[in-house]
Amino acid sequence: MSDTVVFIPAWNEEENLPAVLDDLTRELPDADVLVVDDGSTDRTAEIALARGAEVLSLGTNRGLPIGIAAGYRWALDHGYAYCGRVDADGQHPPSELARLFAIVREGGCDVAVGSRFVSGDGYEPYRYLPSPARRVGTGLLRRGMKLALRRPFADATSGLYAVNANALPVLAEPFRTEAPEVEALLRLSHAGLRVEEVPVRMEPRASGVSKLRGRKAVKVTATVIGTLVVARFLRARGSD
């Protein structure tokens, strides 16, 4: 058994999943792979099994917050020292995840989060330009995260993670909001764990359309704002 597992939350991703699994095998050949099948009605689970991945089936479509917590819980229950997460749509290059794992393994942090919006060696500023509407939302989110975390955080909705065993109990608990990545950062900060935002390159979705659009996107945006407001309120009460 490997000391590392990478999990992929997936709902009806039969078109994109094969390439994601093949890339993971090439870039992280020693890592175990888990597909958290969120009640898919296509061949997602069948494809995952055929390519040697473990499959955790949620039975019905329960949503991304449940799927993310289930992946971390599986890693915790199976005793892994390191756990990574990539999305099933091909946006997260496994080569970038390998970089995040290296930082965590070297002791640089407990959690490395891949960021589209911070720059660094070989990662130029403004390499990823969202639409005007998303830029407004991103700007508001950055301000809210700075207030809640008391530190800048540029890409709070990134789903590209590498974590060590210290973070697994924190991330394995069920998420209470429709903004699990934001909630995860708040939890990790409260637990005193070291979180590093690392510049990465992300790809456009390989095929299909995002599940996060229309009314659902508005709902999630409202949830993010509400989550940050509550976090700020609780922090203020705790300092009284």
Image: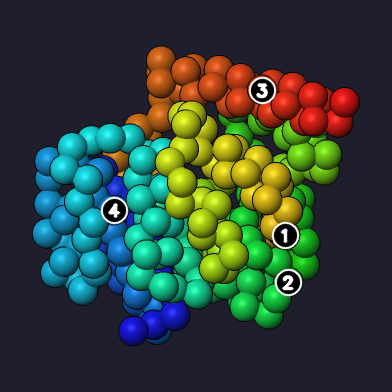
Q: Is residue 132 above or below residue 12?
A: above
Residue 177 on image: x %, y %: 48, 29
Q: Real-space Cα distance between discs 1 and 3?
A: 22 Å
- Mark 1 or mark 3: whose residue is earlier in sequence: 1
Amino acid type for the residue under numbered disc 1 = Arg
Whether residue 124 can be seen here? no
- Mark 4 or mark 1: whose residue is earlier in sequence: 4
Q: Which residue has dot 1 on it?
A: 194
The residue under the point 51% across, 51% down is 171
Amino acid type for the residue under numbered disc 3 = Val
Q: Residue 7's quadrant in the figure?
A: bottom left
Tag 2, which secondary structure? loop
Residue 70 on image: x %, y %: 35, 50
Q: Which residue has dot 2 on it?
A: 108
Which is closer to the viewer, label 2 or label 1?
1
Q: Which residue has dot 3 on it?
A: 230
The residue under the point 51% across, 32% down is 179
Q: Are marks 2 and 3 in contact (CB under 8 Å)?
A: no
